[in-house]
Image (tube, helix red, strand yellow):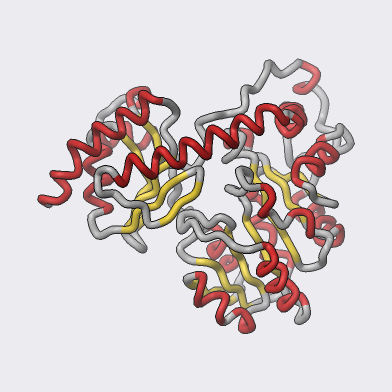
Amino acid sequence: MLEHGGRLLRAARQYGIPAADWLDLSTGISPFAWPVPPIPASAWHPLPEDDDGLVEVARGYYGAPHLLPVAGTQAAIQALPQLRPRSRVGVIAPGYAEHAHAWRRERHVVETLPVDDLLASASRFDVIVLIHPNNPGGERFDPVDLLALHAALVANGGWLVVDEAFIDVEPERSLCTHTELDGLVVLRSVGKFFGLAGARAGFVCAAPALLDAMRERLGPWTLSGPTRHALRAALADVGWQARARAWLHEAGQRLQVTLAAHGVVPTAGCDFFQWWRHADAHALHEALATRGILVRRFDDPASLRFGLPPDDAGFARLDAALTEAMPMVKRW
């Protein structure tokens, strides 16, 4: 299995710091989480029902004509390569590594390329996988350009797959409203924006034929009854969504300023995280970890991704740790 953020318990053991004493910035999950109310017993007892209203609420939130609830977008990432014959697949890099891993595991011919190289050579591929905004590289795309790319791919029987896990702050840039088009697949997650990663829930937006094939592949009851109950309410909570977008936008800018003040000038980022690509990245990771602050380390390229502190105290703690750590990192 590939390495991911969120390994807090492992870090606690490695550095001898109790888990409760850490500031975990290793994921892109919003710390401004939707407040899940008590789950009624009626959600736990029966088998989940597909016609419980979740799909209709999700269509309204995402603007998608058709969609399929799945057990996190990871389930869809693993299933999609099983729905095509052997293909030439281009995947944005650096990016969420599970995409390339899943296509390679199903024996497709996969190339991971920087976005400019990938788009310049798009005609070589049957499938192109993009992340919008990219994680961790932060690249953004004009929806008009993405639709043109899709048209070129689908003309030769290809697909455009767009992972929109971090797009909820800018929903107007989403391609979900266009997913009635054959060969356009958009993945959406509730883990990042709603702060509900533990629910393991997401949605695939695509044309009905592809969704039917994925439904057959994944089988029944992809989401539990309690998860479906919570998501119906979260996706309909328009007031909370507006507050969350404002909070994330402000916190994302504050994180960028905080890092830059210590010479950690972000290479890229979005409202959920900031990415710093630098030769000193591993040294800073270690210096912060010894102070109980966990950030996501990447080896290729050497870089760090900083998630959002949850509050003023978290920002102050990060600021203080960087004040102590950066002189040490520069000496190393």
* Left or right, residue 40 beside residue 248: right
Can I make out residue 229 in this image?
yes
* In the displayed structure image, the side of residue 301 where residue 244 appears, left or right: right
Quadrant in which residue 23 is drawn: top left
In terms of depth relative to the viewer, which is nearer, 297 or 167?
A: 167
Q: Is residue 301 left or right of residue 244?
A: left
Q: Give the camera-side residue of 311 and 74.
A: 311
Looking at the rendering, which quadrant does residue 278 occupy? bottom left
Q: Is any part of residue 228 visible from this angle?
A: no
Residue located farthest toward the right when viewing the structure as drawn:
51
For the point 61% across and 49% down, the residue is 167
The foreground one among 298 and 240 is 240
Q: Residue 164 location, x and y as percent?
A: 63, 52
- Residue name at image x 65 percent, y 33 percent: 242
Above-or-below relation of 123 to 95? below
Q: Residue 309: x and y, percent?
A: 41, 33
Give how far across and how far down residue 67 sits, in percent: 80, 49
Q: Is residue 66 above or below residue 30?
A: below
In the rendering, at what x and y percent does residue 106 appear? 62, 67
Q: Residue furthest left?
A: 331
